[in-house]
Image (cartoon, rainbow, N blue to C red):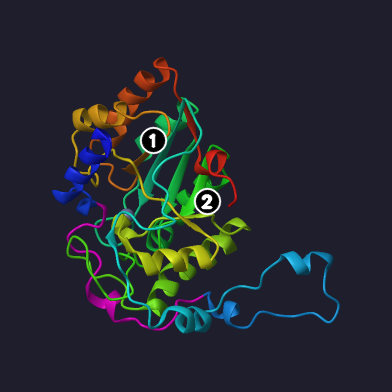
């Protein structure tokens, strides 16, 4: 284990990612919903055509909720945390690239928009990957459309209700996780359908609320056609860090690092910390990339 990884895990042990969700998030009314979210019905009835297109043999039909439940409804998970088979923590094969990723978690206390941060990225032409939750889109529709239209940014899936991804209902930072394979499907596929409708193409990358998952849930992410992307640098401690802490942490990134920060807490130190860390990393010869620039199709 590297020093950086130990530092990440130590920070995690302190609960520093909890700010991603906020104290009022994750429980309450939204937890009572158990039906599939809107927009997923089409996945249950893939259409077929009498005259199959040429590409049909290479295009798999969407995996349905029922199929996921049939495959994994009785599976017992063996891991819980930031790591599981198939979870991506760093960029492969690079001597200089770093991926900045920013989560927009949504929900009560989590639907802010850090405009200063985005302005900094745009002014310096720094590409980034934005993990966006359904609830954040609902709260910031105009901002979402502007971000999605900007080729500097790649939009990724940060879940439908921002739940830790569990098949047994395990919680993280006090936020209850999904309670079975069906709810894991809902958490991924609800926002996947929303993003696909808004962007025209499905997202390639998924990160759960709190970034927690078990190994069965991670397999479901893969089955639905996305890659679970975790992180190697916890850049803003769930948007709880001061600007100085963000600077120190982000400036410690190395080639291949995936840096996790937030774009939904403008009151935090993220924007100022990023503003001072980015020139530092550029001066050391690093280059910033979006995840799809570095993680090719499996
Ligand atoms: Zn989040």
**Few, some or many residues within 10 Å of mark 2 (<14, 14–19, 20+):** few
| 284, above or below 113, in the image | above
Q: Residue at x 27, y 35 (%)?
A: 2
Residue located 31% across and 34% down the image: 271
Highlighted magenta segment, given as a residue range: 20-38
Position in image of residue 224 (x %, y %): 53, 67
Taking 70 as reference, is 1 left or right? left
Q: How many marks?
A: 2
- Image: 73 above or below 56: below
Q: Determine which residue is flagged by label 2.
A: 145
Q: Is residue 216 visible?
A: yes
Q: Nearer the viewer, residue 191 or 72?
A: 72
Residue 263 at x, y = what percent?
Answer: 35, 44
Farthest-out residue, right: 51
Of circles 1 and 2, the one toward us is 1
At mark 2, the secondary structure is helix
Farthest left residue in view? 14
Residue 262 in the image: above or below residue 75: above
Q: Secondary structure at mark 1?
A: loop
Q: Which residue is denoted by mark 1 in the rendering?
A: 257
Q: Residue 169: x and y, percent?
A: 26, 75
View extreme (top): residue: 283
Quarter where residue 41 is shown: bottom right
Q: Quadrant of residue 248?
A: top left
Point out residue 138 in the picture as x, y percentages from the top left corner: 42, 62
Residue 36 is one of the magenta-drawn residues = yes
């Amino acid at each position: 284990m590297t020093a950086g990884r130990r530092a990440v895990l130590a920070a995690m042990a302190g609960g520093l990612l909890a700010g991603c969700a906020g104290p009022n998030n994750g429980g309450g009314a939204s937890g009572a919903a158990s039906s599939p979210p809107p927009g997923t019905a089409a996945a249950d009835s893939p259409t077929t055509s009498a005259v199959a297109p040429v590409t049909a043999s290479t295009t798999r039909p969407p995996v349905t909720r029922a199929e996921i439940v049939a495959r994994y409804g009785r599976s017992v998970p063996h891991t819980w945390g930031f790591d599981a088979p198939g979870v991506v923590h760093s960029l492969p094969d690079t001597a200089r690239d770093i991926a900045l990723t920013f989560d927009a978690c949504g929900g009560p206390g989590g639907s802010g928009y850090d405009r200063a941060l985005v302005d900094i990225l745009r002014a310096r032409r720094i590409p980034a990957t934005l993990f966006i939750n359904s609830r954040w889109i609902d709260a910031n529709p105009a901002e979402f459309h502007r971000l999605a239209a900007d080729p500097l940014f790649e939009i990724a899936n940060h879940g439908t209700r921002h739940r830790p991804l569990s098949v047994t209902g395990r919680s993280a930072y006090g936020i209850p996780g999904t309670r079975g394979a069906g709810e894991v499907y809902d958490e991924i596929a609800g926002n996947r359908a929303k993003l696909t409708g808004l962007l025209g193409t499905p997202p390639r990358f998924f990160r759960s609320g709190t970034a927690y998952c078990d190994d069965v849930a991670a397999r479901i992410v893969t089955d639905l056609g996305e890659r679970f992307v975790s992180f190697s640098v916890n850049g803003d401690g769930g948007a709880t860090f001061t600007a100085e802490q963000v600077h120190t942490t982000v400036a410690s990134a190395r080639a291949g690092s995936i840096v996790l920060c937030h774009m939904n807490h403008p009151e935090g130190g993220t924007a100022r910390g990023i503003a001072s860390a980015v020139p530092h990393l550029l001066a050391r010869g690093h280059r910033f990339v979006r995840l799809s620039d570095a993680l090719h199709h499996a």
